[in-house]
Structure formats: structure tokens, C-alpha cells
Image (tube, rainbow, N blue to C red):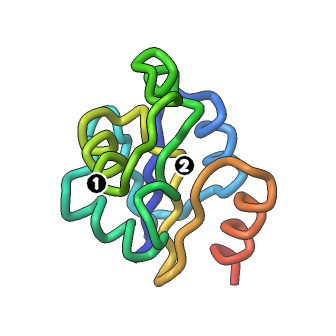
Amino acid sequence: MKKIYHLSTCDTCRRILGELNPGPEVTLQDIKESPLNAAQLDALKERAGSYEALFSKRARLFRQRGLHEKSLAEADYRDLLLEHYTFLKRPVVVWGDAVYIGNAKKTVAAAAEAMTS
């Protein structure tokens, strides 16, 4: 599978998509227009190892809801990820069996390398 989950209104996602320059064989999914469904999220969790790895603790709603003061379980992360697109750490690049989550330079570089090899 060659897919990138992103947010089209996010400047960082747009910049990274420009760097990665995905070809026509890559499916792009704007998570605001087409939110993740349960099957997609569960498949990402299998690759990532946990729902927490997919969860963005930088999301505004995370602090607004006081979630930073709570101890969240995997089921909580899953429910929150399905509830609102902003909780997904993005972009998420799925390349074969590998998954690259977030916008850290090392992560983007690793995704770029995988995409060109």
C-alpha cells in the first residue's frame, strides 16, 4: 500500500507533500474531508504498534479538553482518533509494510528515502 494521510489546510503537511513529491501511484487522503474510519485506524495501529504512536499531543483539543491532565489508555486514544481528525499526528505515510508518522525531520527523511528506493 502506498498512501499518505494528511490535512490539506496544514502548511506543514503541504510543505512535506512538496518535499516527498508523491507520484500518481500514491493515494492521498485528506483527513478533514475523508476522516479515518475504524478499519483504517486499526490497520495503521497494526503497523505503528499503538494508537498512542498515532496520537498528536500537540493538538489544541488535547489541552482544551484537559486531556493532558488525564491518564489515557489505548482505547481512549482510539476513540479520540476516530472522534476528531485533529488528533492524528500527521502526515502519516504508509509505504508497503512501513509507516512514517509525523513531521520530524528524521521521519520525513526516512519516508522520502523509502519512497525513492
- Kind of residue indicated by mark 1: Ala
Relative placement, left or right, of 35 versus 19 is left
Disc 1 target residue: 75
Quadrant where the image shows the C terminus? bottom right
Task: Return the residue nearer the eye: 52 or 4.
Answer: 52
Could you say where residue 46 lies in the image, as x and y percent from the top left? 38, 75
What is the number of the mark on residue 93? none
- Which residue shows up at 42% across the image and 32% down it? 86
- Label 1 sits on a secondary structure element that is helix
Query: For the point 44% across and 65% down, which residue is it?
Result: 50
Q: Which residue is mark 2?
A: 91
CA neighbours of label 1 inside 10 A, class few (<14), some (14 to 19), many (20+): few
Q: Residues within 10 Å of mark 2 (few under 14, many from 20)?
A: many
From this view, report whether residue 9 is shown above or below residue 64.
below
Would residue 110 be found to the left or right of residue 40 on screen? right
Where is residue 105 drawn, in percent x and y? 80, 53
Residue 2 image-quadrant placement: bottom left
Report x, y in % for residue 87: 43, 37
Q: Secondary structure at mark 2?
A: loop
Amino acid type shown at disc 2: Pro
Seen from the viewer's position, the closer of residues 63 and 58 is 63
Which of disc 1 and disc 2 is earlier in sequence?
Answer: 1
